[in-house]
Image: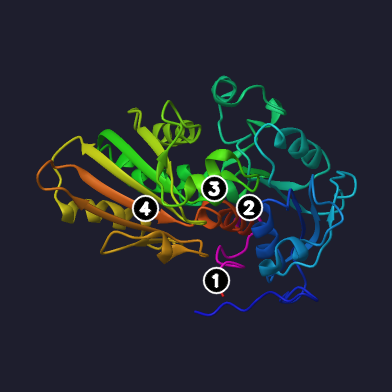
Amino acid sequence: MSRAAPSLSAQPLAGKAVARACVVGASGYAGALAARLLWSHPRVSLEAVTARSEVGRSLHELYPRHRVPLVLEPFDADRMADLDVAFVSYPHGAAGGVVASLRERGLRVVDLSADFRLTDLDAYRDWYGEHGAPSLLGEAVYGLTELHREEIADAALVANPGCYSTAAILALAPLARAGLIEDAVVDAKSGVSGAGREATQATHYVSVADNVTPYGVQGHRHVAEIDQELLRLGCGERVSFTPHLIPVDQGLLASCYVTPTRDLDSAELLGVFREAYDGEPFVELSESPPGVREVRDTNLCRIHVTIEPRTGRALVFAAIDNLWKGASGQAVQNLNLMLGLDELEGLVW
């Protein structure tokens, strides 16, 4: 299916917009893609993009492929007060106060940072430090659409999940809900864009090229989300999770090895996943293990499941684009729900 480039002169709106939006933090990879998706959205008008750096430059100049002509401006909550919705794409710790200022002015917010993903304040402090707006934690809905669709539709603040969390939870949720997880190990690999736009020694080309590197082996922050969501589904077992950096720009694969609570065969396992994801517009069950190229520049999660005959373990492989379903695409999916629109709006051409 071809994708026409968004217009540089005007948004391709289908009639009157149902909401006026801004992207706060549009100079980073996820924020820039969020701006591109909103600029090409048929029902949402993108009115402003802000940044903490690159102020005064056109977003098109910074990211020509996204074709968004708006000029990056400094964040001013009062300037955004007459808008309806906002995406906030700041690093954790920096987003909380910004989200609070937008909520005070009545905007509905999808936050792409980690600041509102954890419901427990002590857990947040353990993983991230002090919180910038703890009073809003109870208001936030965890934005994994396939698990919290009804709550998201009624939410004023949605916490967009992390990329690793999205793939791992979608891979494990059907088993957790069915009480079938005795033990689980998640081996996840992501492209370099997941580390953000600011290069470090670990994400420099010389370090990444022709290399695969585990990191966060003592505990990656996204495991807190995985544990939280699986516990909500009735699974109290903690997951072993190790992320790896791989030499691609976009894409994420979660390989999950699950010891089930009872014997399963492949047909029953597949039935569990079909029941869980039947009718889901952005989850596809694949007959073979997926690769990240299959989902690049889409909001899809492709999942393959099977039983390893020798050990009886359930093997689940989930592939997403870390910038789409793992960030900005999922944010638009959530926004569509919040606005009462079809989830596919602005995500399928």
For mark 2, give the secondary structure.
helix
Amino acid of disc 4: Ala
The residue shown at (81%, 63%) is: 70
Observer-side mark, 4 or 1, equals: 4
Disc sitting over residue 318 in the figure: 4
4 or 3: tag closer to the N-terminus: 3
Distance in Å between CA atoms under marks 2 and 3: 9 Å
The residue shown at (18%, 42%) is: 313
4 or 1: tag closer to the N-terminus: 4
Distance in Å between CA atoms under marks 1 and 2: 18 Å
Q: Position of residue 28 (x, y in %)?
A: 68, 50
The residue shown at (17%, 49%) is: 307
Q: Is residue 94 magenta?
A: no
Q: Main secondary structure of the magenta part?
A: loop
- Mark 4, other Cα within 10 Å: few <14 / some 14–19 / many ≥20: many
Q: Position of residue 195 (x, y in %)?
A: 56, 44
Counting labels gives 4
- As drawn, the residue found furthest toward the left would be 310
* Tag 3 residue: 194
4 or 2: tag closer to the N-terminus: 2
The residue shown at (47%, 47%) is: 166
Residue 203: quadrant of the picture? top right
* Tag 1 residue: 348
* Tag 2 residue: 30
Distance in Å between CA atoms under marks 4 and 2: 20 Å
Residue 67: quadrant of the picture? bottom right
Amino acid of disc 1: Val
Observer-side mark, 2 or 3, equals: 3
Q: Position of residue 221 (x, y in %)?
A: 51, 32
